Image (cartoon, coloured by chain):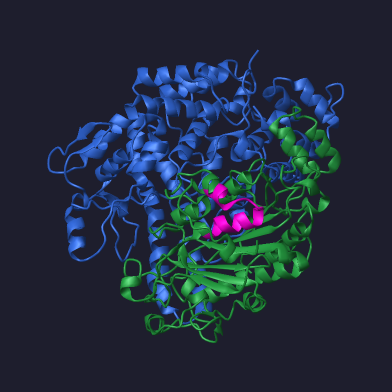
Amino acid sequence: MVKKRYFRKIAFGIGPHQKLPADPIQWAKSQLDDIPALSWKGDVPTGKALLDHYAHWVYTDRKVLRKRYKKDRKAYRVAKEELRHKTGERYFENLELCIRHDSAINSGAPVFERFWWFWCNHFAITDKDFMPEFTTGPYHREILRQNMCGSFEDLALLATTSWAMIHNLDNSESVGPNSKSGKYDRRKGRSVSLNENHARELLELHTVSPAAGYTQDDVISLAKIMTGWEHRYTKQRQECNPVKFNQDSHEPGTHHLFGKAYKQKGLSAKNKLIDVIGDLAAHPETVKFIAKKLCRHFVCDEPTSEIVQPVIDAWAESGGHLPSIHKAVSTVAYEFADQFEKLQPPEIWLLQMVNMTGASWPPTPSQMQYDFKSKPRRIVRSPHRILRELGHNPYRPTQPNGWPDTAIEWLSPELLIRRLALSKRLADKMQRHNRWKPQHMVESNFDSPDEVIEHLGVRDGNFDKLNHSVAIQLLFPSKWMLIS
Amino acid sequence: MTMDRRSFILGSTTLTMLGMPFLGARAERIKKRNLVVIMLRGGMDGLSAVPIRDKILNSARPDIIVRDVRQLNSDFSLHPRLKTFHQLWEEERATVVHATNIPYTNRSHFEGQDLMQSGGHTPYAERTGWLGRGIKAAELNSLAVSLPMPLLLRGAPLPDNYFPTYWSLPNSTMMNQIAATFDEGSLLATTMHQILARPRSMLEFPDGDGEEAVILAKTAAREMKKDYGPRVAVFDVEGFDTHAAQGGNDGEHGEKLGNADELLRVLRDEMGDKFDDTLVLTLTEFGRTLHQNGGYGTEHGYGTAILMAGGLLRKAQIHTDWPGLMTKGLFEGRDLNATIDARAVYCSAMAACFDVDFGYLRKQVFWGEELIDLTETLFRV
């Protein structure tokens, strides 16, 4: 018997037009070797173009409007609102959510999509400045997604040196006290200091975790190694310049991490961070920490060593090859599917509901057309609104450790109320656009279909008389849907 | 008012009104005193809310001087938009702690807003908030009226949250059928039970005139007034980050102060005589620069003021160890300095409201750090 809950543990469930895969593990593994194309048929702007929009927005607001309207705050507000429209400040985040959600349902590789979502949350970009509005979506697409079939080491290096992460964790503000710029600034009477933020998170959240037992000196040392990885700050583009290694703000010398010396090789000190990430990526604590985190996400809140060990082994044997790691997770997730339960977080649950009913979500490319002249229409703003209401917008975690992964964090009365209420909203919508095949859904997705059928009030296996509106409201916030 | 509806938070020490079995162990024994925290996000300018009579201030900010101020004492005055606060001052029910802040000097909103809630020194290092830890130390339960649990209240045992949505719920028959699918004793079942035990008024978006934030403030006040109602409420007022067009009396900063004052007015009016057993205090991530910038605004700074109101205050006073506005007294030559650790005020406020020893809270909430006990100086205990 196929363990049907697996399709919700590792993907978004079985949709109305999908057949139940006979070999679930093979089905999952076959989705992990290549990067599927995004299925969104509308506009997919480049990260570079979106950074230009970001630059236009912050420069015009900070350097033009604030000065022009310094005595007239009403006129300032009006001008700022126009600028919002022109730069798509309320538009692009919604578009990104459409691209993300459309691919979850339609890319043909839902398991890959789930792993993508995992890495987006692992290398989380918090809700800071105007990053959710312009740059977090393209960072997810271009930096993380595009590098999910290589090694963890490469992914970690690219995430660490991306504009999004450098800006999010303030590394551009970190200047080596003995660097050329540091000395210059001191002569000018300006204060010069390291910013440890990025170094600390690289250790604590992205790689080895506190279990590695690093010290404050290690953090400072890594912060020194990371100096120079910055985006230049210019008047015209403010912080929106590409990340380039700047030798002038790099703290010269040899720095030690976990007792190992990192030296400059050649004319640039760029290699120091690259060397460090190589070592951090291969560190046994990194492997343990992230293997467990993967199992926590895909299997259960408290994965046992029996669950985690095969993932650690696959990591070690493959040298951190991500598809091999993902396949090992897919395998244990199936093997332990009937023994351990997982409460699915709101965004995943939303997409499972969409996939399993065939509901019209996200808005279509034509609905997402935007003229950059007026406030985006309600439908255009709906992705952001719904995720905000559910308390789970992937572009807006408030802390750099991303959204939590355990039931205790996602179970509060209000968060559960949102799930109950969204089920009712879906029910109201589905009455008008009915693509749902309840019998197929129940039989393909649940290991105890009889219980579900009884809960829905279906008699003698006759689904024809089922009131869809009532059934949707009863089914989606039920135990069988929330937990898999 | 432009308070963010999403971050309107209401804490509780007892859930009896919800028919919940989780009454805090001490809640029945101690007198009910309410603590309301208003988070002023963006960096509230203490020099604009409570300006000092000093030529340096006027020459540093020629285009954003606050006029028509109300005099508080010979040195300090009050922004004219803080009307309710001034009325309470006249009744000896308002206090200012000036030149204070949390021990954080890096001027980032995100780090600052994390630390003002966690009470720690390292951004993002703590997963609980000082208020949550205080509620736990006082053996009281909590209820947050917010969708995500705010960091400030994390750490309290069995936190509950309330936050109205315009979305409606399935009917009660369906709700009960759904509840029946949850395994007895599971977290899911417990949570569903909390929802089902709620009065209808807490399951629908509250009716009422006026702006949403006012309606919510009224709801909060009504619940806190009850003998077994919530004891802790947390509100957010956003928008203090006035880099441009900060203005004097009618500028952007004044308007935000007006929003906070409106919140205070609603609380005072709705709570009636229970306001005598209430303390309202403000919290912000940092103050702002002494000098105005090119856009007639101010930049991120350090020291600022805490505004407190309510019947639990000892008297109308400005408690400060004023560092002066001369360059050498300023922090890094540019910001009002902070000479009082704001956490001493918060620890003392919790000691007064929760009826717990200051030293015990200092250990349980602030890791035993050196904080001065201001309980008797500031509060009626």
Locate residue B63: give its quadrant. bottom left
Instruction: Give the x, y percent position of residue A90.
Output: 53, 59
- Residue at (44% x, 42% y) in the render: A140
Residue A222 to residue A295: above or below: below
Instruction: Give the x, y percent position of residue B58.
Output: 41, 84
Instruction: Give the x, y percent position of residue B162.
Output: 70, 50
- The residue closer to the viewer here, B364 or A278, is B364
- Residue at (56% x, 41% y) in the render: A101
- Residue at (19% x, 49% y) in the render: A247
- Residue at (52% x, 57% y) in the render: A91
Using residue A384 as the reference point, say whether residue B106 is left or right of it: left
Using residue B369 as the reference point, say whether residue A423 is left or right of it: right
**Quadrant the N terminus of chain A occupies:** top right
Q: Which chain is blue?
A: A
Q: Which chain is green?
A: B
- Per the picture, the main secondary structure of the magenta-coloured stretch is helix
Residue A244 to residue B98: above or below: above
Q: Does the magenta stretch include residue A77?
A: no
Locate residue B309: give its quadrant. bottom right
Using residue A239 as the reference point, say whether residue A11 is left or right of it: right
**Quadrant the C terminus of chain A occupies:** top right
Residue B352 to residue B317: above or below: above
Using residue A372 as the reference point, say whether residue B212 is left or right of it: right
Q: Range of the magenta residues? A: B345-362
Residue found at the far left of this picture = A266
Instruction: Give the x, y percent position of residue A152.
Output: 36, 30
Residue A364 appears in the rendering = no
Residue found at the far bottom of this picture = B68
